[in-house]
Amino acid sequence: MSVLVVTSLGDIVVDLFTDRCPLTTKNFLKLC
């Protein structure tokens, strides 16, 4: 899974490793 962060300076693609760290991924998506 990946997330696209759009900024005024350009786009950033963040790869999320849901199989390795599911809780961290869940927290990241909740805070987005």
Image: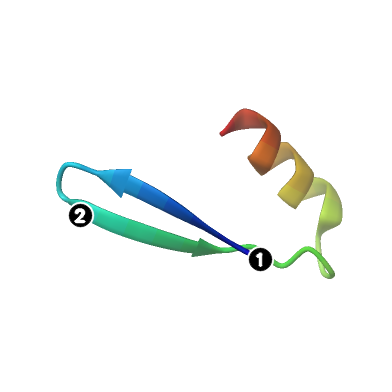
Q: Are marks 2 and 1 in contact (CB under 8 Å)?
A: no
How would you rate the neighbour count of disc 1 (Cα within 10 Å): few for under 14, some for 14-19, many for 20 or more?
Answer: few
Q: Is residue 23 left or right of residue 11?
A: right
Q: Residues within 10 Å of mark 2 (few under 14, many from 20)?
A: few
**Picture quadrant where residue 28 is located:** top right
Using the image, determine if residue 25 lies above or below residue 31: below
Q: Residue at x 73, y 51 (%)?
A: 25
- Left or right: 32 in relation to 1: left
2 or 1: tag closer to the N-terminus? 1
Return the x and y of residue 18 as percentages of the image width and height.
78, 63
Q: Which mark is residue 1?
A: 1
Name the amino acid, label 2: Gly
Q: Position of residue 31 (x, y in %)?
A: 62, 30
Where is residue 26 drawn, in percent x and y?
77, 44
- Residue at image position (84%, 47%) is 23
SS category of the residue bearing label 1: loop
Name the kind of residue labelled 1 in the image.
Met
Question: What residue is drawn where x is 32% and y is 46%?
Answer: 6
CA gap between label 2 and label 1 equals: 20 Å
Q: Secondary structure at mark 2?
A: strand
Please give the label number shown on residue 14: none
Q: Locate the N terminus by quadrant.
A: bottom right
Give residue 19's position: percent from left, percent from top: 84, 69
Above or below for 8 versus 19: above
The residue that disc 2 covers is 10
Q: Number of numbered discs present?
A: 2
The residue sitting at 35% across, 58% down in the picture is: 12
Residue 16 in which image quadrant: bottom right
